[in-house]
């Protein structure tokens, strides 16, 4: 049986993941908007960092929804690779450890 602290910590983790993925999705959309308007852009490193800290689903969804960065291998290969590595790590920590 799970203790209350494990449930609360899981809730915080899920809220964090929801928030960071929304941020990642919006960051891709905002950067696409900025690209169209010729405004100062979001650095690629920032977009990759959002993916790396748990926003992989949101950034990938944003990339294809807004058709942004879809011709750059750094994004089309890198972001899914990061996401898969994170999923494998989570499964390892939850089920194998």
Image (cartoon, rainbow, N blue to C red):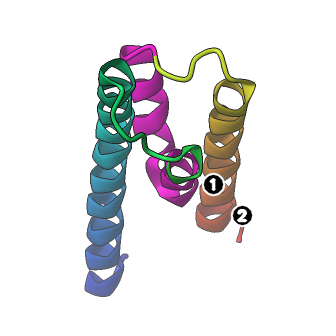
Percent across and percent down for residue 39 are 33, 34
| Left or right relative to 69: residue 32 | left
Q: Are marks 1 and 2 in contact (CB under 8 Å)?
A: yes
Query: The magenta stretch spans which residues?
Result: 47-67
Q: Please tell me in which quadrant of the rendered image residue 38 appears.
A: top left
Residue 48 as seen in the image, left or right of residue 36: right
Mark closer to the observer (1, 2): 1
> How would you rate the neighbour count of disc 2 (Cα within 10 Å): few for under 14, some for 14-19, many for 20 or more?
few
Establish if 51 lies above or below 58: below
Q: Which residue is mark 2?
A: 96
Q: Secondary structure at mark 1?
A: helix
Residue 88 position in % (x across, y down): 69, 50
**Most foreground residue, 37 or 65:** 37
**Residue at image x 53%, y 48%?**
51
Quick one: 9 or 96, which is closer to the camera? 9
Q: Which residue is mark 1?
A: 91
Q: Is residue 55 left or right of residue 5?
A: right
Residue at 67% in and 58% down: 89
């Amino acid at each position: 049986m799970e203790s209350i602290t494990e449930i609360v910590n899981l809730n915080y983790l899920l809220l964090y993941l929801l928030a960071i993925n929304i941020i990642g999705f919006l960051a891709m959309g905002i950067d696409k908007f900025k690209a169209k308007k010729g405004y100062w852009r979001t650095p690629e490193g920032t977009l990759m960092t959002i993916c790396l800290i748990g926003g992989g689903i949101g950034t990938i969804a944003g990339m294809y929804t807004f058709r942004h960065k879809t011709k750059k291998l750094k994004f089309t290969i890198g972001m899914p690779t990061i996401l898969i590595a994170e999923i494998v790590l989570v499964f390892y920590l939850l089920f194998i450890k």
